Image: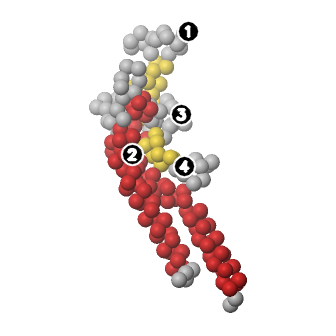
Amino acid sequence: MTIEQEIQEAVKKLQKCGKVFYDNRQRVAALGGAYAASAAEAAAPKSRKPHKRYSTAKLTKKIRAPKGLGKVVATYFPGNLGRSINVLKFSRAKSKVFVGAKLSRRATGNFQGRRTDGYYMHMVEQGTKNWSGKAFFRASWERSKGRVFGIMTNEFKRLGANFEQQNAIK
């Protein structure tokens, strides 16, 4: 075999190796994201009582219905926020995954059990004008990011070792 043929063969193997990593990048990111999501779920604050969201017809935004007269559109049971934190894959983000609160398509009704809606995560994380918030999500990321990167690095190393073994690279 000539040197040109060996170089061509090496280039083909490198391209094939790159394709293996390219095809598995979102799956590997999802492995790390799953660990981050479970850490955030465990850190999410859990209320002791159900909370309700109201919808009231208003003439102006500043006028609110008197206490007890609003229409209840959603009831959020304890643990809803933690259960709503998931690994989210979006069709346009081919190489990434996002970890955050999954929103319900129909944001009315009772949110308990498997049915969740974490639309209010930003209010809990960053606060509102009346409450300073509790930064549980950022804190859980800071605690778990070393392990997340470790999981992803080990999986990429495993992919490389499997490719090396299957393609007899010396």
N-terminal of the pair, mark 3 or mark 4, is 4
Residue at image position (39%, 40%) is 138
Q: Residue furthest front?
A: 3
The dot on residue 27 is none
Numbered disc in front, either 3 or 2? 2
Instruction: Tell me the kind of residue under disc 1.
Output: Leu
N-terminal of the pair, mark 2 or mark 1, is 1
Residue at image position (42%, 56%) is 149
Numbered disc in front, either 4 or 2? 2
Query: x%, y% of residue 134?
Result: 34, 32
Q: Quadrant of the N terminus?
A: bottom right
> Which residue is labeled 2 in the image?
141
Numbered disc in front, either 2 or 1? 2
Q: Secondary structure at mark 2?
A: helix
Q: Secondary structure at mark 3?
A: loop
N-terminal of the pair, mark 3 or mark 2, is 3
Using the image as rendered, state which of residue 161 and residue 50 is in the foreground: 161
Instruction: Tell me the kind of residue under disc 4.
Output: Lys
Q: Is residue 8 above or below residue 90?
A: below
Q: CA distance from mark 2 to mark 1?
A: 42 Å
Instruction: Tell me the kind of residue under disc 3.
Output: Arg
Residue at image position (41%, 24%) is 128
